[in-house]
Amino acid sequence: MNVKQLRAFIAVAQCLSFAQAGERLHLSQPALSLTIKALEDDLGGPLLSRTTRSVALTPEGETLLPLARQLLADWDNTEELLRQRFTLQLGRVAIAAMPAFAGNMLPRALKVFRSRYPRVNVVVHDVINEQVLELVRHRRVELGVGFEPESSEPLIFKPLYLDHFVAVVPTDSPLAQKAQITWHELLQEDFIALQRPSAVRLLLEQHLLAEHGKLAVAFESHQLSTIGRMVANGLGVSAVPALCIQQMQELGACCVGLVEPTIERRIGVTMLADHKLSAAATVTAVSTNSSLETEVVACAHSNSLANRYQ
């Protein structure tokens, strides 16, 4: 039993005429009769009683009619639903992003996406980088945004840009007046860090160990916003990815270029290697990349920010 047969059966049952049903379906009477015959053969008996003058439903035909109507309605609804999802008139996409990205660049990317696809629901998991990768691996989200994983199996990583760390200092600190500062200078102050197992914290410790020893931490927090407020209130200094500059400035802190060493890490989109993205996830990734390209160009032409990114 297939959709074509059900449509033919319903048309004949409604018209009680092969001629009229054939016109409605744009089928010849012989073709329509063969379609109905094939359906009856598949089901094992007659559904229509035919005479030279009339067509009527058999008891089995009466039983099938409401069921056939429901099956076709479900089929048509399914077709329409999928069509809307493929054309992004409807849809849902789940993404995970590390807090540094989720709280800074992601909202702007989602604004672009929302303006184009207002009926697609987006679920954002704001979690540490390690959890971003786990959510992707376990198929709880289609896309993850964060630092490049050390081991990509079974993941695909598509870089968006190369980020680096900047110093976060109080606006009234002498360090705030410099074009750039060294890690040695920064670590003379009380240091405020994200708590483990934050990828930002682990990355700093990994790069500083050889030259500066174990990172001495005065204050710790799970939230970048809390760190920014702590620095703004003179409790110490910190270091964050450059993508957090605007957030730190809005919180009342100052960001300065940080060198010796310059700590860099690629940020990008992670997805499962064997997973075909939904239409909504595909355009979300494209929108995110497009928004970042626009922002990078804007930053490159901004003198105030360009100095901070040296």
Image (tube, rainbow, N blue to C red):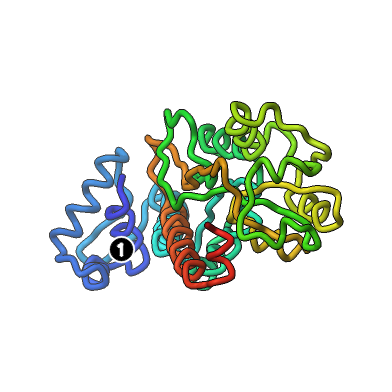
Residue 261 at x, y percent in the picture: 56, 40
Q: Residue at x 54, y 36 (%)?
A: 133
User: Which of 149/64 is in front?
Assistant: 149
Count of marks, rendered view: 1
Residue 115 at x, y percent in the picture: 52, 73
For residue 151, side relative to residue 304 (left or right):
left
Image quadrant assignment for residue 83: bottom left
Image quadrant assignment for residue 307: bottom right
Q: Residues within 10 Å of mark 1 (few under 14, many from 20)?
A: many
Residue 24 showing in the rendered view: yes
Disc 1: which residue = 12
User: Which of 243/98 is in front?
Assistant: 243
Image quadrant assignment for residue 13: bottom left
For residue 14, side relative to residue 100 (left or right):
left
Residue 37 at x, y percent in the picture: 22, 49
Vertical arrangement, residue 44 with respect to residue 35, above or below: above
Q: Residue at x 45, y 49 (%)?
A: 63
Say what amino acid the circle numbered 1 marks: Val
User: Which of 120/301 is in front?
Assistant: 301
For residue 216, side relative to residue 14 (left or right):
right
